[in-house]
Image (cartoon, rainbow, N blue to C red):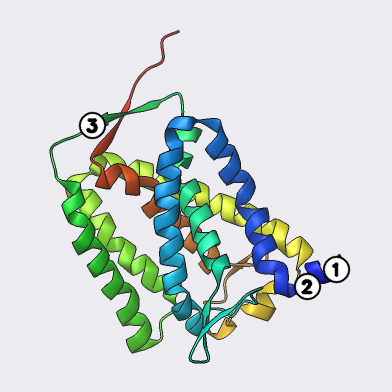
Amino acid sequence: MPTEIWSLKYAYLIGINLMYTPFFLVLFLWRKNTRKQMLIVGLIFGTIAFLTEPIFIKYYWNPEYIFPLFIKGVQIGSFEDFLYGFLKGGIAAVIYEEVFIQTVYKMRSHIHHFKRMIVPIYLGGIILFLLPVIAFNINPIFSSALSCMLFLVYLLIYRQDLLSHALYSGLIVAVITYLGYVAILLIYPGLIESWWKTNFLVGIYITGIPLEELLEGFLVGFFGGVFYEFFNGLKFKHYTKSV
């Protein structure tokens, strides 16, 4: 069993734990007032990861699962996909606040009814995600970036104050993703070649890590980092700490 657990069959689950669990637990235990935010965003992103995994299996990669799920013989993913999205989304939800903990606080903004935008943003995002993949066989990471552009438009129109927050969150999650893959590839050095469909990749690797993975980390951080604030009408206000 000790030897078997390091096989590729367990690489997804072990990799998730190596990459995101420590960060998630530290953030979750650090402050009680952000736990609800982490759980809500984590559940939403976990669900998104699980529901979109069939697209990624067909056009991006084909990971091994401990308990794979099938519908009429077609593999649709597993609980690892939900766990991946849950942990990564939860981290993205609060990472900006924790990194800049001494410089920001929240205040309610009632100028716009942002919750009304959930449906149009998600419907538009789903269309922009699925259409390029189905019609043109585009890498789903890049169609994800296209769908995030819709959210960027809303930020530029209604909440420019959250733009830097989204960018910083994206960059930080991308760095966490990079560090996680460095650790994973030390244990599973042939993982990329075994699971990723290289014909769908652009062929740019950063220390052996596909550029697409870092882009995906940025997109989750960008969208997840301001998801809770945007749809709840919350605003960050900087202040100067007294000496």
Q: Tell whether 15 sits left or right of 150.
A: right
Give the residue at mark 2: 7
Query: Which is nearer the N-term, disc 3 or disc 2?
Result: 2
Q: Quadrant of residue 177?
A: bottom right
Residue 110, image x, y percentages: 15, 36
Q: Which one is in front in this view, the residue at disc 2 or the one at disc 1?
A: 1
**Secondary element type, mark 2:** loop
Check whether the beta carbons of the residues at disc 2 and disc 1 lie within 8 A of each other: no
**Residue 89's disc number:** none
Query: Which is nearer the N-term, disc 2 or disc 1?
Result: 1
Work out which residue is located at the far top of the displayed protein and give it: 243
> Disc 3 residue type?
Arg
Query: 45 or 215: which is nearer to us?
Result: 45
Give the spatial CA distance, label 3 vs label 2.
Answer: 49 Å
**Secondary element type, mark 1:** loop
Query: 207 or 8: which is nearer to us?
Result: 8
* Disc 3 crowd, CA 10 A, few/some/many (<14, 14-19, 20+): few
In percent of the image, x 23 and y 40: which residue is there? 233
Is residue 43 placed above or below 160 in the rendered structure?
below
Give the residue at mark 3: 108
Give the spatial CA distance, label 2 vs label 1.
Answer: 10 Å
In percent of the image, x 70 and y 68: which residue is there? 11
Give the residue at mark 1: 1
